[in-house]
Amino acid sequence: TQPGPAGGDWAPPGRWRIALDGPPGPCWALSVQRDEVLRGYPREARQSWLDDGCYRDQDDRGWPILRDPPGGPTRVQRGDTVNAYATGRRVLRAGAVARRGGGPMPYASLIGADLGGDVLVPVDRSSCHPGMIVRGRASGGFAIMSGSSMAAPWASRWLAGQLARGARPADRQAVAALAGPGPCPVLPAPPQRG
């Protein structure tokens, strides 16, 4: 909603409709990024998302639908909804899972059809109790925070420890192999604080 370079395109915040002009293609890619907080508004940065009336993220019982159903009625999908910063060749993508149960969290992006990241970090207590306890600014203070942004620093700390022990992974796949077997290995849980 604010231009990067001087004179760049921008749009005010709000709900926007997007129409695809031209012949239909097999796949469309759309990049949406949020900017910083507006003065006079709540301190949390605003999130951007695509809204399609046919898309369902919960089933009839209210449980989250973790994977896009094949042949669904909408062209909007959760798969391949990674942050634009996570598309580089050398970027390690850390996803979030629950400590109890180890399942992917419903808010997480998906690489491809169903991978929650190159490595996963248990940063949520459980599916029903998201978040992990972190230190606050005041003496004895704490907060409960969740999200893949909590997984990224822990994955960085883990990788730094691997490098300090002499590991020299050449690429993203080699880093994931250090973490363990399978397409999305789960790193050891961060220690609980508080």
Image: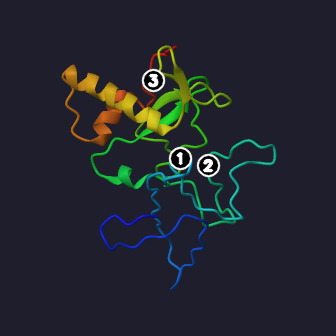
| Disc 1 secondary structure class | loop
Disc 1: which residue: 114
Density class for disc 2 (Cα within 10 Å; few <14, some 14-19, many ≥20) is some
Q: Residue furthest right?
A: 61
Q: Residue furthest bottom?
A: 22
Density class for disc 3 (Cα within 10 Å; few <14, some 14-19, many ≥20) is few
Name the side, left or right, on which 165 lies relative to 189: left
Q: Is residue 184 visible?
A: no
Q: Amino acid at mark 3?
A: Arg
Disc 3: which residue: 137
Asked which colour scheme the image uses, the reply is rainbow
Residue at 59%, 65% (x, y): give it: 14
Between the C-alphas of marks 2 and 3, the distance is 38 Å
| Disc 2 secondary structure class | loop
Closest to the observer, 166 or 42: 42
Disc 2: which residue: 67
User: From the viewer's perspective, is residue 56 above or below residue 19?
Assistant: above
Between the C-alphas of marks 3 and 1, the distance is 37 Å
Residue 75 position within the rendered picture, expressed as x and y whole percent measured from the top left: 61, 67
Closest to the observer, 135 or 38: 38
Report if the CB atoms under discs 1 and 2 are less than 8 Å apart: yes
Residue 153 position within the rendered picture, expressed as x and y whole percent measured from the top left: 37, 32
